[in-house]
Each structure stands twice: as C-alpha cells, then as structure tokens.
Image (tube, rainbow, N blue to C red):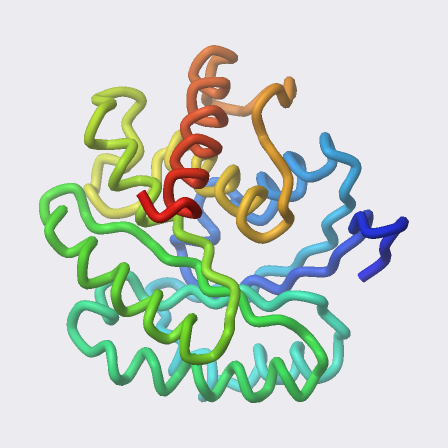
Amino acid sequence: MHRFGTRVVQVRILFIGNSYSARNDLPGLVARLAKERGVVVEHRLISAGGASLRQHLNAGTALAAIAEESYDIVVLQEQSTLPVKNAARMHDSVRDFHAAIEAAGARTALYMTWARSDAPEAQQVLTKAYATIAAELGAELVPVGMVWERFLRTHEHPLLHDDDKSHPAPAGSYLAACVFLISLLGEDPVGIDAPVKGLDADTAALLRQAAWDICQEIADGK
C-alpha cells in the first residue's frame, strides 16, 4: 500500500468469494469508484459458483495467493446462506483465513452480504454472524447487507435483487461498491460523475447518496 502523506493512493485487494462478488464485476466497480477519488485499486477475484470459504480453504488457490502476492487487503465473502445455517462453521473458516492473512502482513475485510428478497428476516442473522467474527478478530466490516436492508425499507426502486431474488442486480452491485469505497477506503462516493453500465445517472446518484447517508447512520450507531 502506497501513501501520500496520510492518504492511500494505491492499494492491492484480493477478493475471495462466489457469484455475489463476481456478478456485475464488483471488484471492478470498486476500482472505478476509487479511481475517481485518486485511489488506484489493483484487484484480483478468486471466485467459484456457490463456493463457501471452507471450499476456498480446501482448494488452496486463495491461500497461495495470500502468501505469495503481497496484498494489502483480503476481502472474504461467505456463501450467502451459510451464516444463517451454520455461523460456527463460517467463523471457523474466517479464523483460518485471518491467520493466513495476518501472517502475510495484510488486513482482513468481511463482505457482509444481504438476505434474499423472499426471506428478509434472515438479514438480522447475517448481520450478527459477520459482525461477531469481525469484532473478535478486529477485521474490517463492510456492511453491505445492512445498507441494503435500510435502503429497501424506503425505496422500491431501483431493484437491488436480480430476478432470482438472490443475486445482485446492477443497482445492488453498485450500492455494494459504494459501501466498499466508504468502509474500506474511507472515501465519499457522493458527487462522483462516471457512467455506470445498466444505470442512469440519476439512479447512480441516488445510490451513492444513500450509501453515504446509511453508512454514516451505522457508524453513529443509529
């Protein structure tokens, strides 16, 4: 990670997850937003459809990348329903990854995902699962699921979920990317003026402002 004064100007991020990270190129969206704030994000995504963190651990590719490729931040995204079904298993996997990440001199970040649109009550369990292990390990928490939940309380449009009620629509991925910009890189997305595929300018502006406002509410404990 390179800094100018106290400002980060270049950061290398490894994303580990599945289609919730890959859909609509979330890492690329984060990088494009960051570029508008003068931050260069070099990124790699290690993804497999439906994969859990335990499957990534067993496959070995992610651990090798952490050990060998000098990342500043490693983002962990658990399979979307596992934290609800078996939070203890998720926590064990995060602990194992965190040990490898710390040994490599990087920071651990947890990408809190969202509840499916037909089971919104699951968000409370997801939030607790991610927040608990983040607090235990001192990991960075990227509260995308919490932001989605609050946005959906007051907005019917744009749709954040895709037609399958699970994966992110373009608006959902863009909102997630804004949360990453705020939570992980400490940058404000409001006022960024860059074309976004699949979103008109007014919708993108709404999502940027909502991400900022909701993240501030969460930070203030509201």
Q: Quadrant of residue 43?
A: bottom right
Left or right, residue 55 beside residue 107: left
Q: Quadrant of residue 151?
A: top left
Q: Is residue 188 above or below residue 112?
A: above
Q: Residue at x 75, y 75 (%)?
A: 69
Q: Position of residue 127 (x, y in %)?
A: 27, 59
Q: Position of residue 143 (x, y in %)?
A: 40, 52
Q: Quadrant of the N terminus?
A: bottom right
Left or right, residue 139 beside residue 43: left
Left or right, residue 85 beside residue 191: left
Q: Quadrant of the C terminus?
A: top left
Q: Residue at x 31, y 22 (%)?
A: 158
Q: Quadrant of residue 28?
A: top right
Q: Position of residue 201 (x, y in %)?
A: 52, 12
Q: Is residue 118 above or below residue 96?
A: above
| Image mark count | 0
Q: Residue at x 61, y 19 (%)?
A: 191
Closer-to-camera residue (30/213) = 213
Left or right, residue 32 beside residue 48: right
